[in-house]
Image: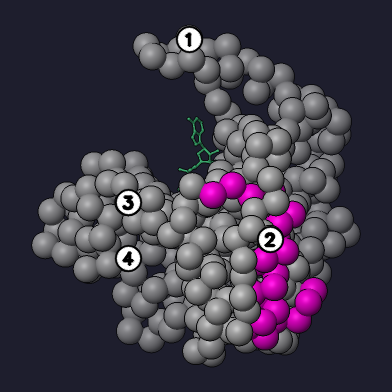
């Protein structure tokens, strides 16, 4: 394992993205987002993605200068075409538009199509909660045909269709749920491969439809498993239709679906219903009460959604971010293909 400060990791990420053709401001925004994901403990959505993004720029899937256009809009809604720009940039802009609408009309909902990987959805849900609003994000896509088996099936038909909700609190960190509707995000399979670890039973079926703990089976046609049996599978189906339907992209299993990350972001003004301060206080009291529930044997603490991420962030700000050598080598090699000579000694920073 190698250990980096977030600042150094941001610098190297943004160097590689700039060399790949991203404008400085875009490269810095995407780098900050990827490193933040490492800080929050989601390496699956962190700098591990750099080589994916540089490859996607090289083969035209990402247009780092893509123009984001508003296709339709109303006082409370908008439909954006992301111009194949980075998903992080498009999603931030979409949530900004949803927040503006919620400020003026109590509700803002913006649907996005034609963008690249949207990253960690909690980032955008928390963007709204930081402004004292409720944030909601649903995302479908990206692989045509899907990579997740619906409940009762052994072959691919859904994607990992994630969602995030965030609410503002008073003194506690923002409460946010952020999850794939598969047992885990696909990136956790990549992270297991990079770490040369087996995965727990229940995450993956191999190409023959049998349960497996070998993460490499995912690359051989295996299907991820939805969380929560029929309920997680059902949630994924609804996200496919809401995000795929509102953006006009459709669900990934249909033959007309093209690679995309159809996403819906929404912001809701709490003050249209209750005084914000009271809502925040209730959230804090609720968190405290939940943590008092009787613990199951072997459990030391009850966590609320988002809490593990905020704690991991604190710890990593203090002690640095660990990156497996395989991930680092992929970053160096992505840089080398773009003419960069990335030296470990310059970048470690701790
Ligand atoms: N952009 C995309 O296309 C895409 C696709 C899939 C997933 N993702 C992202 O992948 C990331 C990881 O998803 P995941 O499903 O693997 O997340 P996860 O299983 O690690 O966490 C899911 C949720 O459970 C909470 N949680 C975790 N452990 C807990 C515990 N012990 N007690 C209470 N709550 C707990 C977390 O705070 C989080 O809100 C998310 O950020 C998601 O947005 C993105």
Q: Are marks 2 and 4 in contact (CB under 8 Å)?
A: no
Quadrant location, the C terminus: top right
The residue sitting at 61% across, 36% down in the picture is 312
Q: Earlier in the sequence, mark 3 or mark 2?
A: 3
Asked if residue 187 lies left or right of residue 335, the reply is left
Mark 2 lies on residue = 346
Across and down, in percent, residue 40 comes to 61, 44
The magenta stretch spans residue 138 = no
Across and down, in percent, residue 43 comes to 52, 52
**Marks 3/2: CA distance?**
26 Å
Closer to the observer: label 1 or label 2?
Answer: 2
Q: Earlier in the sequence, mark 3 or mark 4?
A: 4
**Marks 2/4: CA distance?**
38 Å
Q: Earlier in the sequence, mark 3 or mark 1?
A: 3
**Marks 3/1: CA distance?**
37 Å
The front one of 115 and 41 is: 41
């Amino acid at each position: 394992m190698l250990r980096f400060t977030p600042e150094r990791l941001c610098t190297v990420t943004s160097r590689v993205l700039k060399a790949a053709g991203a404008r400085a401001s875009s490269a810095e925004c995407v780098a900050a987002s990827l490193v933040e994901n490492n800080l929050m403990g989601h390496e699956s959505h962190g700098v591990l993605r750099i080589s994916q993004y540089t490859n996607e720029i090289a083969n035209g899937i990402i247009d780092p200068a893509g123009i984001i256009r508003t296709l339709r809009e109303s006082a409370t809604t908008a439909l954006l075409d992301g111009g194949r720009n980075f998903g992080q940039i498009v999603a931030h802009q979409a949530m900004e538009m949803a927040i503006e609408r919620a400020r003026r009309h109590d509700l803002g909902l913006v649907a996005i199509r034609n963008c690249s990987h949207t990253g960690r959805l909690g980032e955008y849900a928390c963007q709204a909660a930081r402004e004292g609003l409720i944030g909601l994000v649903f995302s479908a896509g990206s692989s045509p045909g899907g990579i997740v088996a619906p409940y009762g099936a052994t072959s691919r038909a859904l994607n990992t269709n994630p969602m995030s909700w965030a609410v503002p609190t008073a003194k506690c960190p923002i409460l946010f749920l952020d999850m794939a509707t598969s047992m885990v995000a696909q990136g956790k399979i990549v992270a297991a491969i990079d770490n040369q670890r087996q995965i727990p039973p229940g995450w993956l079926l191999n190409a023959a439809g049998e349960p497996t703990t070998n993460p490499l089976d995912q690359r051989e046609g295996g299907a991820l498993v939805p969380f929560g049996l029929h309920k997680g599978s059902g949630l994924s189906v609804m996200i496919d239709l809401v995000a795929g339907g509102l953006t006009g992209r459709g669900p990934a299993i249909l033959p007309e679906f093209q690679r995309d990350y159809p996403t819906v972001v929404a912001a809701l003004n709490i003050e249209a219903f209750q005084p914000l301060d009271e809502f925040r206080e209730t959230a804090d009291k609720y968190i405290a009460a939940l943590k008092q529930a009787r613990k199951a044997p072997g459990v030391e603490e009850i966590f609320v959604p988002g809490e593990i991420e905020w704690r991991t962030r604190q710890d990593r700000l203090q002690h640095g971010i660990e990156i497996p050598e395989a991930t680092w080598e992929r970053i160096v090699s992505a840089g080398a293909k773009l003419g960069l000579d990335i030296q470990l000694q310059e970048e470690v920073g701790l």
